[in-house]
Image (spheres, grey):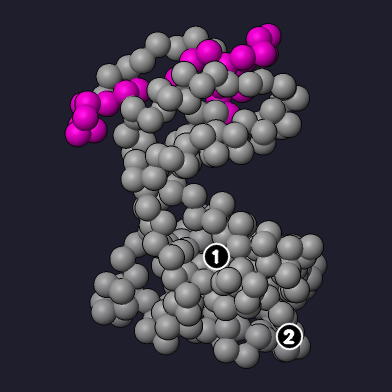
Amino acid sequence: TVSETTATVLLLGESGTGKELFAKAIHDTSPRTDKLFLAVNCGAIPENLIESEIFGHTKGAFTGAIAKMKGKFELADGGTIFLDEVGDLPLSLQVKLLRVLQERKFERVGGKETIKVDVRVIAATNQDIEKMVKEKRFREDLYYRINVVSFKIPPLRERKDDIPLLVKLFLKKYNSEYSRSLEIKDKTVEQMFLYHWPGNVRELENIIASAVAHNNEGKIIEDIKGKTTTRDGDIPDPIGINI
């Protein structure tokens, strides 16, 4: 399977479809499972900081660089780095990423030492990256480097059979995080099949997190904040709330 190789993977799909969960599953079922999995949201880091965040910097490399800092690639050596929203990387940084994928080495910002790493790269984007290549907004050579194996992750509304498994996963996560021991009724999960899920897996996770956080007395989640929709999913109607 793909997880057993070191092949670079590109994940495509709408925002919130669970691309990071998918990437983590690849890592967890790979020979690198006992090593670090590091996620980097390329669209959330300011352009003037993202190179330092990914590759690290030396002391004095720029104003505020008061000490040497390892970047995400160096920290993830032996493991997996997940580059979310890779389409948001500036062109200047795409060149350096291409070198890492080709040669597995780089220099920190302000540094001369060449650092070699063994990192499995999984990239993801919700953009039309082929269109970006045609418009010269994404390097063609980098696109072919990250697109060794690609998966298009369908939106949650097209894979509602995943809802029970996702609910179980998020319930376990937030029970642990909020020191709860909640369960959820089957009828509550069934309600979720009626919803169109415009926010995809991220919306489902947020709803479960909210339900667990607010239920600090009971043991059963009776109902969920959310909405049902008409058959075509265009007209949302509120459902009852009792958590």
Earlier-in-chain disc, 2 versus 1: 1
What residue is shown at x 57% (from left), y 89% (from top)?
Answer: 102
Q: Quadrant of the C terminus?
A: top right
What's drawn in magenta, residue-wise?
A: 209-235
Is residue 88 in view from this perspective?
no
The residue tagged 2 is: 116
Three-letter amino acid code of the residue under disc 2: Lys
Image position of 105 with respect to 55: above or below? below
Are the two marked residues, 2 and 1, in contact with CB atoms closer than 8 angstroms? no
Residue at which label 1 appears: 83
The image shows residue 18, relative to residue 35, as above or below, that is above
- Residue 146 x, y percent position in the rendering: 48, 77
Density class for disc 2 (Cα within 10 Å; few <14, some 14-19, many ≥20) is: some
Residue 230 locus on image (x, y percent): 22, 26
Q: CA distance from mark 2 to mark 1?
A: 19 Å
Q: Is residue 197 left or right of residue 9?
A: left
